[in-house]
Image: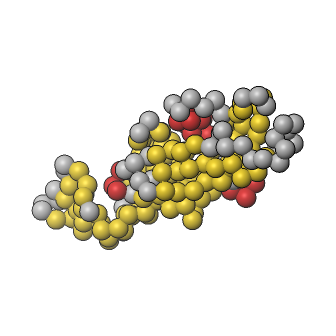
Amino acid sequence: VSMDARGVVRNGIRVSDLHVDLTGVAPSDGFKEARVDKLSGTAFFSWSDLQAAAATQHLDVELAEGPDNSIRVTGPIPGLGKVTLQSKLSLGPDNRLQLTAAKVESPVPGLSGRIPKELDFPLALGSLPMNLTLQLNDLKTSADGLRVKALADDVTITSSGISN
């Protein structure tokens, strides 16, 4: 079974598109619930949706695809003006994405080799539909946004919701 959801919002962060394939689906109780062995899918976040999420943290940044699955973050740093950084993405508990500056993209007077942390920020999604958990080991950046693999195992879907 395949399912798609668009515009899912969690903690003020919009998941532009969520595609999930369910395997081992076993309906029961007169089709009122189903047990699912494994869910595997992809969560897609557009750059504009991620920028809007950063704005809720009072960060005026532009996000774009960077080299080697990094994310290019451009924004103002007090006293230095607009700076572009290559940021790495890490994943913490509760589907928390963390952008952390790894490299200054172009020389900026006043930085003296330091990597500024003013444009680092978290995106804490919290729970996703069907108890999906993001998997950072399968991350793809592209011109239109960020795709992250999402997985869940042993899920029961009922008319009142989802449980593990």
Lateral position of residue 140 relative to residue 32, left or right: right
Query: Viewer-proximal residue, 49 or 31?
Result: 49
Lateral position of residue 42 relative to residue 82, left or right: left
Q: Which of the 4 image quadrants contains residue 145? A: top right
User: Quadrant where the C terminus lies?
Assistant: bottom left
Q: Which of the 4 image quadrants contains residue 153? A: bottom left
Colour convention: secondary structure
- Relative to 141, residue 6 above or below: above
Specify whether residue 141 is in view.
Answer: no
Extreme-left residue of the structure: 29
Query: Viewer-proximal residue, 67 or 24?
Result: 67
Circle count? 0
Q: Residue at x 48, y 51 (%)?
A: 96
Q: Residue at x 33, y 55 (%)?
A: 130
- Relative to 3, residue 72 above or below: above
Q: Residue at x 56, y 50 (%)?
A: 98
Q: Residue at x 41, y 39 (%)?
A: 11
Residue 93 in the image: x percent, y percent? Answer: 44, 57
User: Quadrant where the N terminus lies?
Assistant: bottom left
Lateral position of residue 52 relative to residue 76, left or right: left
Specify whether residue 26 is in view.
Answer: yes
Residue 61 in the image: x percent, y percent? Answer: 66, 33
- Relative to 137, residue 126 above or below: above
Residue 155 in the image: x percent, y percent? Answer: 29, 63
Query: Viewer-proximal residue, 57 or 112?
Result: 112
Query: Viewer-proximal residue, 143 or 50?
Result: 50
